[in-house]
Amino acid sequence: MTSQARHPLYTPEERLRRDRSVWTIVQGVLAPLQFLVMIVSAVLLVRYLATGLGGEAAVISVVIKTVLLYLIMITGSIWEKEVFGKWLFAPAFFWEDVVSMGVMALHTAYLVGLVVPFLSSTGLAWLALVAYAAYTVNALQFVLKLKAARRQEAALREGKTGDGGLAEVTS
């Protein structure tokens, strides 16, 4: 534990805005959908790299995954604005947003590589897998944050004080 103070993930007002926002539901649907598409796409990419077969299916799957990423980033930014009053980089999700920007850059580089051939098709497949590894780290960040929020809410229901096991939130 560092010397930084721990803060609740959501204030009572933010929690109310989160619970009332349609974007909370949208995020709850898009996140697992994007993860499922990533798994299928990763399998197609590995198949392509191992056998040379299915290159077109792999490319299409990465494009679909990237479109879903853009969609979840746009709707997530709207959600963050509704809940925290900032389009991105609200203190409660600062590091998740920082990593998300890297994930977006890698996925965007893949799309650019389809138009401007700066990598071979094999190189692009590897770039997509690197982007997926970064995305997986980012998804884990959000899952851990969701668990922390649930612990906080359970502690509040039980009338406990303290952070309920929350991860640190830096300002």
Image (cartoon, helix red, strand yellow):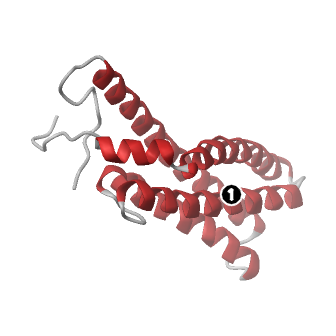
Question: In this picture, is 99 found above or below 146?
Answer: below
Q: Residue furthest left?
A: 3
Q: Is 164 on the left-hand or right-hand side of 84?
A: left
- In the rendered view, tell whether residue 70 sits above or below residue 32: below
Viewer-nearest residue: 123 or 153: 153
Image point 32% across, 29% down: which residue?
152
Residue displayed at 80% across by 61% down: 59
Quarter occupied by the C terminus: bottom left
Give residue 114's position: percent from left, percent from top: 75, 74
**Is 29 in front, or is 85?**
85
The residue lying at 42 percent from left, 35 percent from top is 144
Q: Is residue 165 left or right of residue 112?
A: left
Front one among 103 and 157: 157
Q: Is residue 64 visible?
A: yes
Does residue 10 appear in this view?
Answer: no
Q: Residues within 10 Å of mark 1 (few under 14, many from 20)?
A: some
x and y percentages locating residue 32 in the rendered image? 65, 40
- 104 displayed left or right of 5: right
x and y percentages locating residue 145 in the rendered image = 40, 39
Splitting the image into 4 quarters, where does residue 86 fall? bottom left
Q: Quick check: 45 left or right of 77?
A: right
Indicate the amino acid at tag 1.
Leu
Residue 50 in picture, x, y percent from top left: 80, 47
Location of mark 1 (residue): 68
Q: Is residue 35 above or below residue 105?
A: above
